[in-house]
Image (cartoon, rainbow, N blue to C red):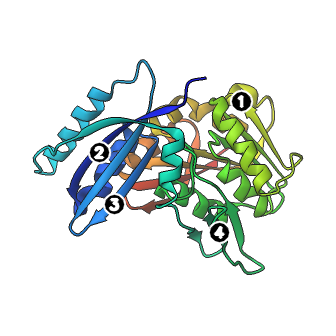
Amino acid sequence: MNKQTWQCLRLEVPSACSEELGARAYALGSCGLQAEETGERTRLSIYFATEPDFDLAMVRRELELALAALDLAPPLIEVDRVEAEDWEEDWRRFFRPVWATPRIVVHPSWIPVETKEDQVAIVIDPKMAFGTGGHESTQLCLQALDRFLSPQARCLDLGTGSGILSIAAALLGAESVLAVDVDEVAVVNARENLARNAIAEQCVEVRTGSLEVVGEASFDLILANIQSHILRPLLTPIDRLLKPVGLVLFSGLLVREGADFCGWVEDAGLQIETTMEKGEWICVVARNAR
């Protein structure tokens, strides 16, 4: 059996522009990023899935254009391949507990945290391409979930990845969560994390697929931490899955995409409730307007 590998671009940039460049990398399809600060410079390791039709040369050109737009000369960009096991071991040096909100903390199994009675701790060990809580878009979605989840809500986690949002919803009091992802590896990882956090299958069900596997169910709250180009054709079907006055949390969006995305959301029949920002990222909270 072949070991899973990832393509990696490594470059060093001024620290002041590392966040914007990282956001651009995620928009181009990056599934993971490491940043090592060295004074006023940052060493970025940007990971991409190894797929036959993935154009890494195009990504490299786009990153160089992004740097040029910041009046920076293109730096030396190294390209290599990393085995998943090596990446996961190396990532332990970077992964620390993340307090997404005052009552939600995400931490690896090897770093225990103490919580108060009204706080929830989510255990997520790093797996390439699946959320660990460190990315701003995931933190925004957790913040919105903490703010808008109603007790005993029925939830849909669209593109569950590591299952982090489903776990949070369950721990915060959701009655049930349906978690779906088109990636079978993500489904396996989500189920592992649900078991690691002692979440019962009766509370969170994980299915392989997208909206086509949801059926005729309706939901009080839908979580969609997915890139905008994937979300756009799903907006109208998502609206149909919401209960009256149900909410949907859209994350995984760059701030510069916000105006266009909000227009698409309203065209689909949803009403914008609020928007939340963190760094280069935005979360759009919309309501069923029917």
Residue 99 lies in quadrant: bottom right
Asked if residue 107 lies left or right of residue 74, the reply is right
Q: How many marks?
A: 4
Check disc 2 and report the residue beneath it.
10
| Dot 2 amino acid type | Arg
Say which label, 2 or 1, has the lower sequence index: 2
| Dot 4 amino acid type | Ile
Disc 3 to disc 1, how far (Cα)?
35 Å
**Circle nearer the viewer, 2 or 1:** 2
Residue at screen point 66% across, 65% down: 146
Question: Does dot 1 land on a helix, a strand or a loop?
Answer: strand
Per the rendering, the mark at residue 208 is 1
> For mark 4, does the 10 Å Cα neighbourhood hold few (<14), some (14 to 19), or many (20 or more) residues?
many
Locate the N terminus and report the quarter of the image it occupies.
top right
Asked if residue 179 lies left or right of residue 279, the reply is right
Residue at screen point 53% across, 28% down: 233
| Dot 1 amino acid type | Thr
Give the image location of residue 10, x and y in percent: 29, 45
Disc 4 to disc 3, how far (Cα)?
26 Å
Question: Does dot 2 land on a helix, a strand or a loop?
Answer: strand
Check disc 4 and report the residue beneath it.
104
> For mark 1, does the 10 Å Cα neighbourhood hold few (<14), some (14 to 19), or many (20 or more) residues?
some
Say which label, 1 or 4, has the lower sequence index: 4
- Is the C-beta separation of discs 4 and 2 under 8 Å? no
Locate the C terminus and report the quarter of the image it occupies.
top right
Check disc 3 and report the residue beneath it.
36
Question: Does dot 4 land on a helix, a strand or a loop?
Answer: strand
Question: Does dot 3 land on a helix, a strand or a loop?
Answer: strand
Say which label, 4 or 3, has the lower sequence index: 3
Residue 25 lies in quadrant: top left
